[in-house]
Image: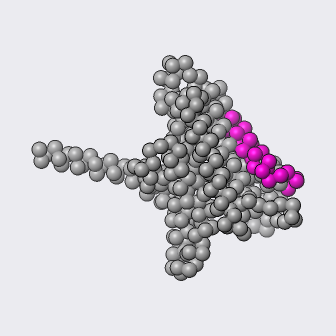
Amino acid sequence: MDLNLFLSSMPGAIAQGLIWGLMAIGLYISYKILDFADLSVDGSFTTGGAVFVVSVLNGVNIYFAMIFAFLAGCIAGLVTGIFNTKFGIPPILAGILTQLGLYSINLRIIGQDFTPSGIDVKALESIPRGLFTPIISSMFTSRSLISLLIIMALIIALLYWFFGTELGHSIRATGSNKNMAKANGINIDATTIIALVLSNGIVALSGAAFAQYQGSAEVSMGQGAIVIGLAAIIIGEVIFGKIFKNFALRLLGAGLGGVIYYIVIQTVVNVGFNTNDMKILTALVVALFLGVPYWKSKIAQKKVKNKEVKE
């Protein structure tokens, strides 16, 4: 492995890791807090990127375009929440249905601009640089890192405040025990919908950041996003779980998990791993980190048994 090449690729890997870490923070709300397996995030990630790019191409201010992307993701989360709470559809299937519908919607948003490779894509390259100055771009890594760190810090701070409110505690209670929450007068349908709206909104915002970073949006950009998000969450828990006890720090752990994930991926790529095998590599990394807590519990149980036998 070329050490200079590896070091030069690190800023870009960290920037992409922060983008996916932002996505992991959104997924943390549904997966960890609400205990809702939301598969719609693959679609809402792309929706965020598509809405952002199309908005900018139509002359919308970059910051407003990111807000529009967030709101589009919120709508996607609302649909999933309604499917689950009002139609009685199980969480996984509700997410799949939303994801399926979003594929067609994303095609509509992006339009029919195909690259030579056949990928449906909408690019930002046609905009004069004077009219569009990205705050997140692969061409300006230092600026991207600062912007992403600020965005992540703001989101963590807002979520820390929100989940400290009565409504935030109600969402936590719903995720912990729905029956108990309902018995205490909490409208679990409303809290479920609000959590999914917030979760998908943040995921879509990360999709907007990713589209801005690569300079385009395509319908396949969110494929496998939930796997990367889960990997970031699990990595964050495994590495920082014992030292990050505060809620805000747990959110930060999920964000840093995305950075660590991308550093691992970049390291393996620099070693010479075939990029066509990235999906299986991702699956192996996720499986490895998912298995760590299980192995730890097994080792702990074995130590307890051995101690009991000795006594």
Tell me: 14 left or right of 289.
Answer: right
Q: Position of residue 77 (x, y in %)?
A: 67, 38
Magenta: predominant secondary structure element? helix
Q: Position of residue 237 (x, y in %)?
A: 45, 50
Q: Position of residue 136 (x, y in %)?
A: 71, 60
Tell me: 95 left or right of 238.
Answer: right
Which of the image's four quarters has the C terminus? top left
Q: Decide: is 232 above or below 83.
A: below
Q: Decide: is 181 above or below 242.
A: above
Name the residue rendered at 26%, 46% in the picture. 301
Q: Quadrant of residue 7?
A: bottom right
Q: Position of residue 198 (x, y in %)?
A: 65, 39
Residue 141: say if magenta.
no
Name the residue rendered at 51%, 70% in the picture. 268
Name the residue rendered at 40%, 49% in the picture. 242
Q: Decide: is 68 above or below 19.
A: above
How many marks overall?
A: 0
Query: From this viewpoint, is residue 231 visible?
Result: no
Residue 73: say if magenta.
yes
Tell me: 216 left or right of 88.
Answer: right
* Extreme residue toward the left, this view: 311
Residue range (magenta) = 57-80
What coloring was used for the rendering? one colour
Q: Decide: is 239 above or below 177.
A: below
Name the residue rendered at 70%, 55% in the picture. 209
Query: From this viewpoint, is residue 262 visible?
Result: yes
